[in-house]
């Protein structure tokens, strides 16, 4: 049984980020999940307030209910605990492209003021400073999911005025919008410092919330452009004892399993 | 029609230098043993095709087997970078590597078109992405609605190599679990090699998403138990996550990498030797089912 009273309520910035992201998922939504922080957040939602959330991994597992977090997108754990497993062409064509996904989760190496994401190269394409893994499923998740939650740590290196390469389109290089895309794009960006949302008119990312103890100035100094700030910046509710405990249990189970 | 062969002979006969080779497996059932055998036979100038070039292609790129890589995501899943791949792209070491990259949706559609005998695939993709400037994608209009869509060329490899759980004595292939794009990659290929965990009297799948490839769609079958290590074969082995984590350190340094390839691939001569060497190392755990 959960011992809420004696639980350590001090939490890390990453825990705050994961908890904030998990709260954005509603029960019953169909969610396309990536590995890492998104997978943590989506499973936290499933194990707390959204037991009927449907998790789809791009390896083709649909209705996935992992006991432990996968290290890779194709761990056996995912296939063993899915309602069904389909081929990769099918997951992208019949499930993502056909519009069956409510929410996608993405991360990236870089994001710019209009929510465009780069996971391809830092520097020039032909002569990159850092060659990143590349697109994977991201461009079509960004294009076809109903909306997208972006999660990444807030650093000046990641939050750049203009991304070196547009792998996945947010609102375009100049904030032109979402013409040609089915989904609404990046409706919320969750970092370890706060929450950003695109301005409804200009599409420029705007700081709408900071996590407890984070000053607006700290967010600005970690952003590589002159970040817009909402008139009213709210403070995120800190993680509850229950959220922290479910998350920590999940991570402890995962560590134990992966060290076997 | 599928012929049973040793892995050595299958690779020797069906993978000439300069071939376009697709080795598929989406984290699960990755044909590592076949990749190692290509390294032992010093295959050269290959065009390597794979949605997720992970550690197996890092090894093949690191020894200089590849001239070109066609892919959609090149990382060490759950761990980070592929350092040999990065060294080739960022510094041309040990040789420059030509890239042709897509999104996963694009690659999957290309394979499906290849399997369908069509020249190209249509999908809703790539809109506004800088990938368009760097890859083979065109825009077409739906003849019925006028909607603008993306077209990507079919993918037909010279040889596709996959690992599966079972073959029966006729050479019919049975696989299950996460089967990625393997069926399309085999059906779209001119020739194919399948390594399997075991040969059985009757295919007996023990998991979801059963895929059967009839013997007459396969060129060669080789029985290579644990031929997917450090990937896994559902029902036979578990993913050696510790190895993937360790690969990050092995592959960071050119000399450490070369030493590893020499000791665990070249000097082991065949897959059973590789498994013995991996299990014998201090941190070796998973190769034989642990």
Image (spheres, coloured by chain):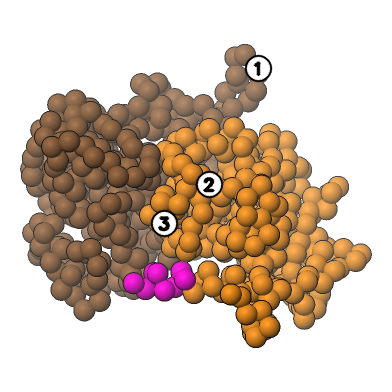
Chain colours: A orange, B brown
The residue beneath circle 3 is A77
Cβ–Cβ under 8 Å for marks 1 and 2: no
**Foreground pick, B86 / A81:** A81
- Give the residues drawn in magenta, as a range: A253-260
Cβ–Cβ under 8 Å for marks 3 and 1: no
Q: Is residue B275 visible?
A: yes
Quarter holding the C terminus of chain B?
Answer: bottom left
- Are the residues flagged by discs 2 and 3 from a single subunit? yes
Q: Can you tell which of label 1 and label 2 is closer to the viewer?
A: 2
Q: CA distance from mark 2 to mark 3?
A: 13 Å
SS state under label 1: loop
| Residue A168 in the image: above or below residue B77 | above
Q: CA distance from mark 1 to mark 2?
A: 33 Å
First in residue order: circle 2 vs circle 3: 2
Q: CA distance from mark 3 to mark 1?
A: 42 Å
- Are the residues flagged by discs 1 and 2 from a single subunit? no
Residue at figure coordinates x 21%, y 37% from the top left: B203
Dominant secondary structure of the residues highlighted in magenta in the image: helix
Q: How many marks?
A: 3
The residue beneath circle 1 is B145
The residue beneath circle 2 is A63
């Amino acid at each position: 049984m959960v011992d809420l009273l004696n639980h350590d309520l001090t939490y890390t910035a990453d825990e705050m980020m994961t908890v904030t992201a998990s709260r954005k998922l509603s029960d019953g939504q169909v969610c396309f999940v990536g590995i890492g922080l998104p997978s943590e957040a989506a499973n936290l939602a499933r194990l707390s307030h959204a037991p009927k959330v449907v998790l789809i991994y791009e390896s083709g597992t649909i209705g996935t209910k992992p006991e432990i977090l996968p290290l890779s997108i194709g761990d056996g754990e995912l296939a063993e605990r899915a309602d069904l497993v389909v081929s990769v062409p099918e997951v992208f064509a019949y499930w993502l492209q056909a519009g069956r996904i409510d929410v996608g989760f993405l991360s990236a190496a870089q994001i710019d003021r209009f929510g465009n994401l780069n996971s391809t190269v830092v520097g020039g394409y032909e002569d990159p400073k850092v060659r990143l893994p590349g697109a994977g499923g991201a461009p079509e998740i960004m294009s076809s999911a109903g909306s997208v939650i972006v999660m990444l740590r807030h650093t000046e290196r990641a939050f750049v005025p203009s991304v070196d390469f547009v792998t996945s389109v947010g609102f375009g290089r100049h904030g032109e919008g979402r013409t040609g895309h089915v989904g609404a794009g990046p409706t919320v960006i969750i970092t370890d410092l706060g929450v950003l949302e695109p301005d409804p008119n200009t599409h420029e990312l705007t700081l709408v919330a900071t996590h407890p103890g984070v000053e607006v100035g700290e967010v600005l100094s970690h952003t590589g452009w002159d970040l817009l700030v909402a008139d009213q910046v709210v403070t995120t509710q800190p993680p509850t004892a229950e959220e922290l405990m479910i998350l920590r249990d999940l991570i402890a189970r995962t560590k134990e399993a992966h060290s076997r | 029609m599928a012929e049973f062969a040793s892995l050595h002979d299958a690779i020797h006969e069906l993978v000439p230098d300069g071939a376009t080779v697709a080795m598929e497996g989406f984290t699960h059932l990755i044909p590592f043993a076949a990749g190692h055998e290509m390294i032992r036979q010093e295959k050269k100038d290959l065009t390597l095709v794979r949605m997720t070039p992970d550690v197996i292609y890092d090894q093949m790129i690191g020894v200089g087997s590849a001239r070109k890589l066609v892919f959609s995501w090149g990382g060490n899943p759950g761990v980070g970078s592929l350092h040999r791949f990065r060294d080739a792209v960022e510094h041309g070491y040990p040789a420059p590597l030509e890239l042709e990259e897509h999104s996963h949706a694009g690659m999957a559609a290309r394979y499906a078109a290849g399997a369908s005998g069509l020249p190209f695939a249509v999908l809703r993709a790539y809109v506004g992405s800088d990938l368009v400037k760097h890859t083979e994608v065109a825009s077409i209009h739906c003849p019925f609605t006028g909607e603008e869509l993306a077209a990507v060329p079919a993918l037909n490899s010279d040889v596709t190599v996959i690992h599966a759980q079972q073959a029966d004595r006729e050479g019919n292939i049975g696989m299950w679990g996460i089967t990625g794009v393997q069926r399309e990659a085999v059906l779209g290929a001119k020739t194919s090699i399948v390594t399997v965990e075991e040969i059985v009297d009757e295919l007996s799948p023990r998991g979801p998403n059963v895929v059967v490839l009839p013997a007459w769609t396969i060129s060669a079958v080789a029985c290579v138990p644990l031929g997917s290590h450090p990937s896994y074969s559902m029902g036979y082995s578990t993913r050696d996550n510790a190895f993937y984590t360790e690969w990050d350190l092995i592959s960071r340094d050119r000399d450490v990498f070369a030493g590893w390839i020499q000791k665990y691939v070249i000097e082991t001569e065949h897959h059973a030797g590789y498994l013995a060497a991996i299990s014998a190392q201090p941190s070796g755990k998973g190769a034989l089912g642990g």
